[in-house]
Structure formats: C-alpha cells, structure tokens
Image (tube, helix red, strand yellow):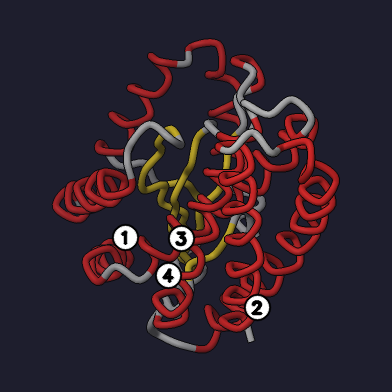
Amino acid sequence: MPYSLEYSRSFNTCLKRILKKFPNSERTIRKEIERLGINPDQGDKYPGFGAFAVRKMRIRLPEYGMGKRGGLRLIFLVHPEKGKIVPLILYQKGLFPEQEVRAAIIAALKEIAAEL
Amino acid sequence: METTECSRFSGNLGSTAAMLDTGAGAGLMVSIIPQSIFRLVMHHFQSRKTLKIVREATAICAEACDHADCLKGIYKNVSLIRDNYLKIFNLASRLPIISILRPWIEADLENWEDLAEDCQIGSDKDFRRLVCQVAEKI
C-alpha cells in the first residue's frame, strides 16, 4: 500500500539548502524521496522502534560525480499504522565531523516535534 | 556473534594498517607490497562478510526490541575499523601499488563510516526520544 509523505517546514528548509548546493541533482533527489512512498523499505533500519521504523538511506549524486560516499544521507520515519512517511533530515555525508552530525539531527528533530 | 566478528576484524585490520604505516614510514614498502595487497584483498571480503552479519543482526534486533544496546555494544569496534580504514585509505593515496585497490578501500571505508554513524545516532537517547515524539504526533 502506498504511503503518504509528510513534509515538515524544517525538512523543507533542509531540502531547499541541499538543492541550492546541488541544483543539478534536484530531479534525482526529489525522485529518491518520492520513491519512498511506494517502497519505504530502503536503507538501513535503526533497531528498537517497535511499531514504526526509522531508516537511513544513501542518495548518490551522479550529476556531481558523487557516489554514495560523499553523497547525501536521508533519515526518515515510516509509520505503517498511519500510512505515513516523514522525512526527518537530509544532509551531505562527510560535511560535518561526527559530533556535529548528531547535533544537526537532534536540532532538526526538535524543530519537527515542535512544529507538529 | 556480531560483536565477536567485529572484534576479530578490527584486530586484523588494525595490524594491516600498522604494517602499512610502519612500512611507508621506513621506506620498506617494496618488501611488504605483496603481503599488503593480499591482506587488503582479504580484508575487502572480510569487511563485506562482517558488515552483513552486523546489519542482519541489527535488523533482527529492530523487530524484537525497544532499545538499541546492540549498537552501543559494537560501536567501539566499528569506530576502530572505520579509523583503520581511513588510515589505510590515506596511505593508499601515497603508495602507487596499493592505490590500485583504492576503490575497494574507499567503498569499505564508506560502509564502516555509515555504520559507525548509525551506531552513534541509533543508540542516542535524545534521538530516540525525539523520534518517538514525532511518531506520536503525526
């Protein structure tokens, strides 16, 4: 059953920032995100969330010669009971040191939780 | 099992990284090139096998539990593997013969970087709490 994608303001801001940096990959990036609605079982799953799933997917940017290393990472939530997928954060791999990735993800989640 | 596999692979990879580092530093690369290439090829296949075991174990765990202690448990070894791959990747760019294996080394490094990141984020209490909040509210 297809899922509906629920975009938060926070994620849209994040997406806009990435598209500004990689304008030639807009079609690729949007297509990869939209595809989740039909096939949400992509990427690796974080353990222990029970009824819903949290996954991380790699997005290549062939337009910029980027394979999956140095490409993008998309973390998203899949809620089968509600039939919804919520993209949480999209970031460029390797741009931040380890601790800053965590901080960016936590900040994005706080914004999304506050917005809903 | 995944902890044992990670630990074993971490040890093997660490000794290869040390060997390459010492050899490069002392200008002894010619004498260790055949052994280095053999070890790096073996590590590539070991890496794939170990990653598969770890990912499958965490996927099973994902269905069955409501915590992520498995990720915390393997993080130390995973980050050591990632650090050693990074060392080898940087050395490979300086050593012409070894550099033919660079694409494999880079692919393996990418996989372990991702897993290290997943271990850290997936076991983070704030991450887990906030994701659950978002899930409740949608």
Q: Are marks 2 and 3 on the same chain?
A: yes
Quadrant containing the N terminus of chain B in the rendered view? bottom right
What is the three-letter code of the residue carrying label 1? Ile
Question: Which mark is first along the chain, 2 or 4?
Answer: 2
Mark 3 surroundings within 10 Å by alpha-carbon count, few (fewer than 14), some (14 through 19), many (20 or more): some
In three-dimensional space, the C-alpha distance between marks 3 and 4, rounded to whole angstroms, equals: 5 Å
Specify whether B39 is left or right of B5.
right
Question: Which mark is first along the chain, 3 or 2?
Answer: 2
Frontmost of labels 4 and 1 is: 4
Which chain does the residue under circle 4 lie in? Answer: B
Specify whether B104 is left or right of B106.
right
What residue does disc 1 label?
B138
In this rendering, the count of numbered labels is: 4
Which chain does the residue under circle 3 lie in? Answer: B
Q: Which mark is residue B5?
A: 2
Q: Identify the element where label 4 is drawn.
A: helix
What x and y, as percent, mark residue B117?
Answer: 43, 55
Q: Identify the element where label 2 is drawn.
A: helix
What residue does disc 4 label?
B76
